Amino acid sequence: MDLQALTQALEAAFDRVAPKGDAGHDVHHARRVRDNAMRIADREGGDRAVLTAAAYLHDLVSPPKDSPDRKRASALSAEAAAPVLRELGFDEDRVAAARHAIHAHSFSAGVEPTTVEAKVLQDADRLEALGAIGVARTFYTAGLMGSAMFDADDPFAVRRPLDDRRFALDHFAAKLMTLPATMQTAAGRELAEERLAVMHAFLGAIAGELGTHPAW
């Protein structure tokens, strides 16, 4: 099966089995992760069929951010992906490769990626948390969780501990701005730094509108 046919089959599978109602993890997110992965793979290599499949199926199980099952999401997604991959004609080596990439992509799972495909997918997914799309997804997810946009009295947590469960803006310092240093590939790191600059510009803009200065 060529990549075009595989992509069509994965789109159909995604529509059939993926969870609904979370625009942060919908098919458009999967497509962007795929595109990020292909861009990174242009420099880093990797099996493009495995990467395409893993990109579409990496969030098959996606509990809410504040769920106790969140750390198990990538393991559960990898398990759920296996029968889909076999239906698409993947041999067991490719099934195993895609499952490892899916399992290792998650920040919260803490699984070390050991293959090129796993490293590329992890970087591709983390790029979605950065840049303008990362800003949009942060505030979208905060809305789902019922979090405030920021602490009006101390938006940059100068006089209090960071609390990104209560305040969306805190998530930038608590996690997002640390992501470029975690990138597994040189290509991913370069793209992450470009997107981090966009986030710094956003923080500067929101600080200016609030009459303060960004602390991060």
Image (spheres, grey):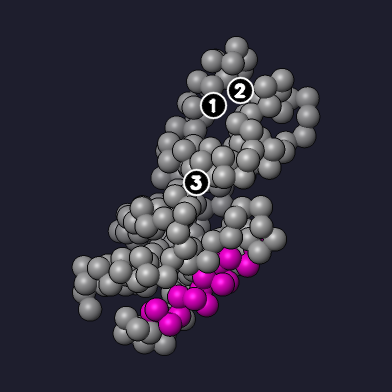
Horizontal side, residue 207 vs residue 17: left or right: right
Q: Position of residue 147 (x, y in %)?
A: 64, 38
The residue at 62%/45% (across/down) is: 145
Can you see residue 79? Answer: yes
Depicted 2 relative to depicted 182: above or below? below
Name the mark on residue 203: 1
The residue at 47%/63% (across/down) is: 19
Q: CA gap, disc 1 to disc 3?
A: 15 Å
Magenta stretch, main secondary structure, is helix
* Neighbourhood count class around disc 3 (C-alpha, 10 Å): few under 14, some 14–19, many 20 upward: many
Horizontal side, residue 79 vs residue 160: left or right: left
Is the Cβ of the residue at disc 2 closer than 8 Å to that at disc 1? yes
Instruction: Kindly identify which residue carries mark 3.
Output: 129
Q: Earlier in the sequence, mark 2 or mark 1?
A: 1
Q: Position of residue 130 (x, y in %)?
A: 48, 42
Q: Magenta residues, as a range?
A: 71-85
